[in-house]
Each structure stands twice: as structure tokens, then as C-alpha cells.
Amino acid sequence: MQFSTRLPVACHILLCIAIFGGQYKTTSTFLADSVGINPVIVRNTLGQLKVAGLVRVEAGVGGASLEKDPKDITLLDIFHAVEEKEDLFHFHENPNPNCPVGRNVHAVLSGQLRAVNDAMERQLQSVTLQMLIDETEKRIAAQGASE
């Protein structure tokens, strides 16, 4: 199963803003260099994060900064900022009502798939940006010590 890259890209951007914000201007060009994508995609993602109240963006070369404390930003907040507000799973719309399986498949699967979706959202809610920052900084420090 493959999902969009929007959540990992948004997390990468937020991690760069949090970790490099005091040292560098976190412009779309700077962020795009770290993420390895076009600055236009970064600007679009920053726009979504701004609308969600997660970042501030200064026009021009001002760069981006966090609007909220990283302890108060969850992966679910980021997910909702950058992904469409739809369920994880989409049903095929026209199962054959004359088929015994076709007329029952939605009823049989809907509760199960809703439970999977809810579990994913609970897990995303349990992880904060601060947790990701701490893990990233720990890994950076370990890599620096081994060089």
C-alpha cells in the first residue's frame, strides 16, 4: 500500500524549521535543499501548514518559524494540515446488488476499515513534533560523535 508523501515532507520541513531556525533563515529554497524537492512544493506545503496554524511565514527571504510549541503539534495535526479530509480507505461505488457478496461487502468492511483508520489516527495523535525533534537531535549527535 502506498500513501502520499505529503506527511513525511511536511514533517521534514517542520523538523528543519525547528532544528535550523536559530542558525539559518529557513526559506523555501533552504528547506527544499534539505528535503530534495522543488521550492514550489515547499511553499505550497508551508502554505498548508500556515493555514493550519502550525507555522509563520515571512514573505521574501524572512523564512518560516513554528507558530506553536513542538510539544503541542502532533503528527495528526500535520496529517490534517496536508492531506485531504477523507477516510483512509475508499469503497468501490458500484458493487453488484444482485450478488450476495456485492450487496453486503460495504456493511461487512466498513466497521473494520473505520477501526483501522481510527487506530492510525490515535497513533498519529500520540506522536509530537517535539518527540521527532528529540530523536533527530539524538541521531545527529550520535553521528557527529562517530565521525
Image (cartoon, rainbow, N blue to C red):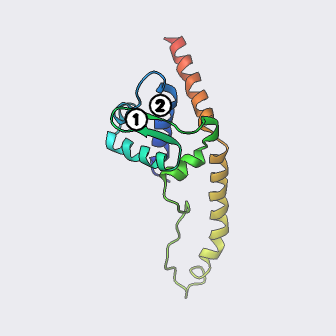
Residue mark closest to the camera, 2 vs 1: 2
Which of the two residues, 105 or 140, is positioned nearer the viewer here? Answer: 140
Image vertical order of residue 77 relative to residue 143, above or below: below
Asked if labels 1 and 2 touch by Cβ distance under 8 angstroms, the answer is yes
Q: Is residue 110 above or below residue 40?
A: below
Q: Position of residue 21 (x, y in %)?
A: 47, 27
Apparent side of residue 109 relative to residue 21 in the rendered image (left or right):
right
- Left or right side of 35 for 141: right
> In the rendering, which numbered label is found on residue 35?
1
State the image coordinates of residue 115 (x, y, percent, origin top left): 67, 61
Most foreground residue, 55 or 101: 55
Q: Which of 130/109 is in front?
A: 130
Identity of the residue drawn at 64% across and 36% down: 71
Task: Using residue 110 as the reference point, say whether residue 28 is left or right of it.
Answer: left
Residue occupied by mark 2: 16
Relative height, residue 9 to residue 31 (above, below): below
Mark 2, other Cα within 10 Å: few <14 / some 14–19 / many ≥20: many
Residue 11, compared with residue 94, is above or below; it is above
Left-right relation of 64 to 112: left
Comes first in the chain, label 2 or label 1: 2
Kind of residue at disc 2: Cys
